[in-house]
Image (tube, grey):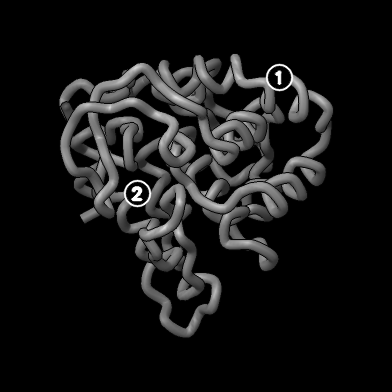
Amino acid sequence: MANVGNQLPTQAVSKPASGKHGNVLPLWGNEKTMNLNPMILTNVLSSPYFKVQLYELKTYHEVVDEIYFKVNHAEPWEKGSRKTAGQTGMCGGVRGVGTGGIVSTAYCLLYKLFTLKLTRKQLMGLITHSDSPYIRALGFMYIRYTQPPADLVDWYDGFLDDEEMPIVQQELDVKAGGGCVMTVGEMLRSFLTKLEWFSTLFPRIPCPCRNLLT
């Protein structure tokens, strides 16, 4: 299944006029879908939570507050809502073919962040946020879905192995319903080395960029 993931053309990069380290972020891949799995995106866009509650949130800070109060895992689907027939996935979860389910609050908010067209400063605010590891998790997922593969190491470096850095060592349970606890550093290493994230796939990393991650 890995070879039929969200494969994207390597040239599909929207370059900001202000340069790599300016406040305007580049965008890699599809500028409308955020490179999300089509089934997940369809369920996000049709979700009453996204269409009604999140529609009322207009600012970055309002969305961050919503993440703080509402997100308690980082899976695409809520526990037990997806009909699947497949094989064992990460952390004992089920990965297979299905017709969708109840898309998670986390992924609705992840796409809401995308609609706000985050700046570099705002994205840095997410991944260094001190109030909740789930705010940081969504920031790092935003990077994995939208930033050029060649930039991933620059974004994640410093959050992977520093044992004296509390933000790296803080644990979060990424599985819907609980049962898959990892540190932020462990989560990021998974983002860099695996396409699979529970019942979905991250965008494929082209081979030349993949060599930079090893």
Quadrant where the C terminus is found in the figure: bottom left
Q: Position of residue 62 (x, y in %)?
A: 81, 42
SS for callout 1: helix
In the picture as drawn, the residue positioned furthest to the bottom comes out as 164
Q: Position of residue 177 (x, y in %)?
A: 45, 51
Q: Which kind of residue does numbered mark 1 sit on?
A: Lys
162 sits left or right of 66 in the view:
left
Which-is-in-front pick, marks 2 and 1? 1
Q: Position of residue 64 (x, y in %)?
A: 73, 47
Query: Within 10 Å of the Cα at label 1, are there few (<14), some (14-19), or many (20+) other Cα atoms?
Result: few
Q: CA distance from mark 2 to mark 1?
A: 29 Å
26 sits left or right of 68 in the view:
left
Q: Is residue 137 visible?
A: yes
Name which residue lies at 55% across and 47% down: 138
Quadrant where the N terminus is found in the figure: top left
Q: Position of residue 142 (x, y in %)?
A: 52, 40
Q: Which mark is residue 156?
A: none
Residue ID for mark 2? 191
Name which residue lies at 82% across and 36% down: 59
Mark with earlier residue (2, 1):
1
Residue ID for mark 1? 51
Name which residue lies at 36% across and 17% down: 99
Q: Are marks 2 and 1 in contact (CB under 8 Å)?
A: no
